[in-house]
Image (spheres, rainbow, N blue to C red):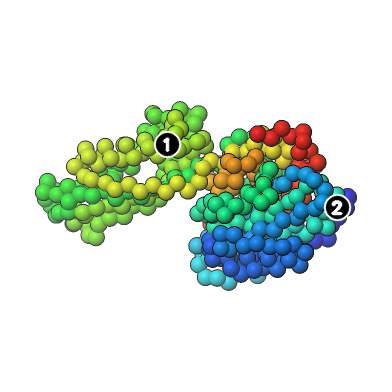
């Protein structure tokens, strides 16, 4: 066991304690005041100067005299509006708020990685920017970028990771190219003319129009876009009407469009533009009007090939077996994509699913939990990834 591995093992109790403390005190996006204060205090105790960005985001720079590249290590710190249903000693103490995605683990791992990198700074030929980002669930990366998180000093590359319960503990996944989906969220109000269900001809029925709209937009995925360009259109909310014998004036639909390719108005596929075209046409066919609101939440997360290869080799050093390093793509979205679209980046999935411990529950579920035994491996990925990046930067040929 080398010095870094031994140090990570020494800090495992602290690592778990940090994760459990964050888990017990979850805070929603841009409300992570306690979390930010804990992060600041920890980093300042290491001798680092901290800076607030995007209200509750925290940034610190480890910059030594030895010249070299600048690597950004990023963790997200926000929780979700979910009531926890686990029976744990460290369950959420904030009613209706829960770390149901693993951000508590990400924060703890990056803090301990910062401690080790500070201790080993004399062997580091480069600088490390530690970034603790708020509001990942709703695009909190953008305000940090707008406030200059990638500048002063200019970031050369970014590395991040995510605990992943669908992936077995003891494994990691690193893939070049698209690994997480782009996400557009829609809200459609279908407007008709209310009336009596016994006289439907005297009304303009928005329920029929909404039902037809839900069915019709599905052709986008199977008839309009190449099936090798994965696209998912899902409806998560339908509301309208007050009684069974009343045709309502309007019906409201909400949902999401997810894709694993550039999906904006300049792309060839344009799933959201196609959605708007079909929705308007269907409503017009049913003599209804419609209002469409689109929120562009996340762009696809694309790993730089050279950074992905660096991350994969780093994972092999830690896990010791090629069979424990796999590839993974998911339609879940992550605003780490905002960073990796501007500088070369790699995003690693750290398996945290252990059936015997009951940690295979899906993310964003009120019974979500992780296998804490994987936390030291996450710290090692960040620490060794930083050393490998700094030592190999000139030969990486990053895009």
Q: Which mark is residue 265?
A: 1
Front one among 53 and 392: 53
Q: Where is residue 185 in the image (x, y as percent from the top left)?
A: 42, 48
CA gap, disc 1 to disc 2? Answer: 48 Å
Residue pictured at 21% horizontal, 54% vertical: 249
Vertical arrangement, residue 358 with respect to residue 294, above or below = below
The image quarter containing residue 371 is bottom right
Q: Where is residue 54 in the image (x, y as percent from the top left)?
A: 56, 59
Position of residue 62 in the picture relative to residue 364 (left or right): right
Front one among 388 and 179: 388
Q: Name the residue under label 2.
A: 122
Total count of labels: 2
Residue pictured at 59% horizontal, 59% vertical: 53
- Visible residue check, residue 368: no
Q: Position of residue 82 (x, y in %)?
A: 51, 62
* Foreground tag (1 vs 2): 2
């Amino acid at each position: 066991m080398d010095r870094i591995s031994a140090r990570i093992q020494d800090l495992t109790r602290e690592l778990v304690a940090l994760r459990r403390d964050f888990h017990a005190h979850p805070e929603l996006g841009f409300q992570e005041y306690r979390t930010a204060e804990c992060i600041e205090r920890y980093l300042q105790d290491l001798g680092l100067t901290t800076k607030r960005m995007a209200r509750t985001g925290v940034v610190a720079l480890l910059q030594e005299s030895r010249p070299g590249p600048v690597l950004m290590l990023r963790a997200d710190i926000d929780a979700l509006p979910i009531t926890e249903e686990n029976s744990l000693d460290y369950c959420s103490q904030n009613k209706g708020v829960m770390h149901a995605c693993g951000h508590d683990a990400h924060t703890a791992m990056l803090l301990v990685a910062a401690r080790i990198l500070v201790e080993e700074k004399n062997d580091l030929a480069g600088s490390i920017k530690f970034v603790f980002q708020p509001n990942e669930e709703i695009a909190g990366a953008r305000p940090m970028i707008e406030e200059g998180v990638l500048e002063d000093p200019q970031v050369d590359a970014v590395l991040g990771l995510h605990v992943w319960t669908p992936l077995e503990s003891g494994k990691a996944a690193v893939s070049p190219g698209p690994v997480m989906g782009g996400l557009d969220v829609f809200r459609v109000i279908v407007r008709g003319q209310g009336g009596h269900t016994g006289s439907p001809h005297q009304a303009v029925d928005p329920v029929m129009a909404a039902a037809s709209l839900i069915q019709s937009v599905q052709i986008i995925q199977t008839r309009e876009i190449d099936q090798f360009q994965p696209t998912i259109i899902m409806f998560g909310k339908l509301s309208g009407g007050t009684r069974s014998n009343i045709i309502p004036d309007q019906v409201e639909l909400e949902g999401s469009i997810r894709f694993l390719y550039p999906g904006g108005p300049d792309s060839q596929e344009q799933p959201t533009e196609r959605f708007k075209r079909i929705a308007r046409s269907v409503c017009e066919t049913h003599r209804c009007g419609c209002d469409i609101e689109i929120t562009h939440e996340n762009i696809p997360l694309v790993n730089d090939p050279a950074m992905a290869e660096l991350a994969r080799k780093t994972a092999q050093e830690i896990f010791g077996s090629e069979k424990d390093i796999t590839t993974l793509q998911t339609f879940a979205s992550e605003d780490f994509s905002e960073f990796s679209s501007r500088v070369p980046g790699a995003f690693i999935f750290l398996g945290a699913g252990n059936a015997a411990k009951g940690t295979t529950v899906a993310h964003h579920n009120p019974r979500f939990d992780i296998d804490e035994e994987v936390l030291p491996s996450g710290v090692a990925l960040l620490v060794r990834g930083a050393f490998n990046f700094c030592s190999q930067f000139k030969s990486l040929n990053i895009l």
